[in-house]
Amino acid sequence: HDHKGGWDGCVPSWLLRRLRAETNELARALARRPIVPDQIIHEAADVANFAMFIAAKIHRKYLDPQERG
């Protein structure tokens, strides 16, 4: 997904909106019948990725001594 650009410049509030959107997509995938395992796995990975992006940004900003100067 390198063609999509990086997430590093994204603000946490935008990332949270994307996380919520991905969570909704995961909920729809889980409710779908018949179950489509690949779709559920893909959506769950998207949820995890956006949560990780938020955690990494906050870590860098508040806990990484190199970033704080």
Image (spheres, helix red, strand yellow):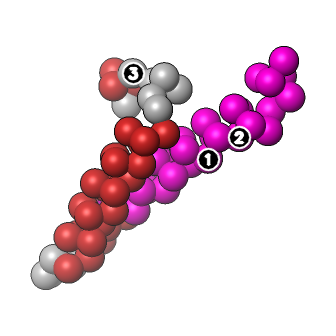
Q: Main secondary structure of the magenta part?
A: helix
Placement of 55 over or under 26, stated as above or below: above
User: Could you give the CA–CA distance between mark 2 and mark 1, rounded to whole angstroms?
Assistant: 6 Å
What residue does disc 3 label?
5
Q: In the rendering, which numbered label is found on residue 59?
A: 2
Q: Are marks 2 and 1 in contact (CB under 8 Å)?
A: yes
Return the x and y of residue 17 as percentages of the image width and height. Answer: 34, 48
Judge from the rendering whether residue 13 lies leftward or rightward of residue 29; answer left or right.
Answer: right
Q: Amino acid at mark 2?
A: His
45 or 59, which is in the foreground?
59
37 or 30, which is in the foreground?
30
Q: Amino acid at mark 1?
A: Ala
Dot 2 alpha-carbon crowd within 10 angstroms: few under 14, some 14 to 19, many 20 or more? few
Q: Residue furthest top?
A: 69
30 or 56, which is in the foreground?
56
User: Could you give the CA–CA distance between mark 3 and mark 2, rounded to whole angstroms?
Assistant: 21 Å
Q: Is residue 38 visible?
A: no
Dot 1 alpha-carbon crowd within 10 angstroms: few under 14, some 14 to 19, many 20 or more? few
Judge from the rendering whether residue 62 lies leftward or rightward of residue 69; answer left or right.
Answer: left
Q: Secondary structure at mark 2?
A: helix
Q: Is 28 within the magenta?
A: no
User: Could you give the CA–CA distance between mark 1 and mark 3, rounded to whole angstroms?
Assistant: 19 Å
Q: Secondary structure at mark 1?
A: helix
Q: Amino acid at mark 3?
A: Gly
Quick one: quadrant of the C terminus?
A: top right
Residue in the picture at 13% in, 81% down: 33
From which residue to which does the magenta span run?
Answer: 43-69
Return the x and y of residue 42 as percentages of the image width and height. Answer: 34, 57
What residue does disc 1 label?
55
Residue in the picture at 38% in, 52% down: 19
